[in-house]
Amino acid sequence: MTAEFTHFDDGGAARMVDVGAKDVTRRVARAAGRVVMAPQTLSLIRGGGHQKGDVLAVARLAGIMAAKRTADLIPLCHSLPLDSTSVEFDFDDERTLRIEATAACTGRTGVEMEALTAVSVAALTVYDMCKSVDRTMTIDAIQLVEKTGGRSGHFVRGPEGPPK
């Protein structure tokens, strides 16, 4: 791989990448991550029995809102007019909540950071809402799963998936 860092100028100073000459294309990114917890905690989430309410509904909203604010959180990200953002949940096993976010826009730069931010903040929201019953939770395997659009083309993560 002969890629170079684009967020530094010739002198090594941080800079925002100029995307003005890039083509406007449809750009979509999917990211995923997981929260691993005690089986009893996941059971509470699944059954909607948590005293704070519907954990997944709150985490979904938090993830979507975070995607819309990515440029406020990541210093050199461009502010993007998102066409859509979604956050979905799946129960991989009795201990693992999988989170997947998709972000899309029609623009000059990709939406990978928006999808990754959505997953991250959704996971943190699950942790925040459940920490009173389970401080052993871990958040891990946050990664880009797929992206389309732009000069670099289509990327799909290989079959190895997240680390175990």
Image: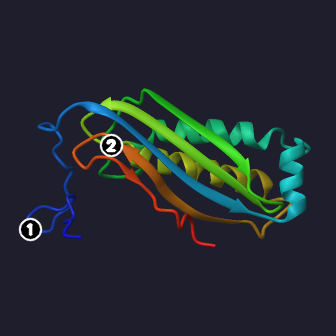
Instruction: Name the side, left or right, on which 112 lies relative to 123.
Output: left
Residue 2 can be seen in this image: yes
Q: Quadrant of the N terminus?
A: bottom left
Q: Please give the residue where the numbered disc 2 appears in the rendered image.
A: 110
**Residue 126, image x, y percentages:** 71, 51
Would you say the residues marked 2 and 1 are in contact, meaning their CB atoms lie under 8 Å apart? Answer: no
Residue kind at label 2, given as amino acid type: Gly
Tell me what residue is drawn at x 78 percent, y 67 percent: 135
Foreground residue among 27 and 125: 27
Q: Quadrant of the C terminus?
A: bottom right
Q: Please give the residue where the numbered disc 1 appears in the rendered image.
A: 11
Real-space CA distance between mark 2 and mark 1, rounded to the nearest whole angstrom = 26 Å
**Residue 61, image x, y percentages:** 63, 35
Tell me what residue is drawn at x 87 percent, y 62 percent: 39
Element marked by disc 1: loop
**Residue 71, image x, y percentages:** 37, 43
Residue 50 can be seen in this image: no
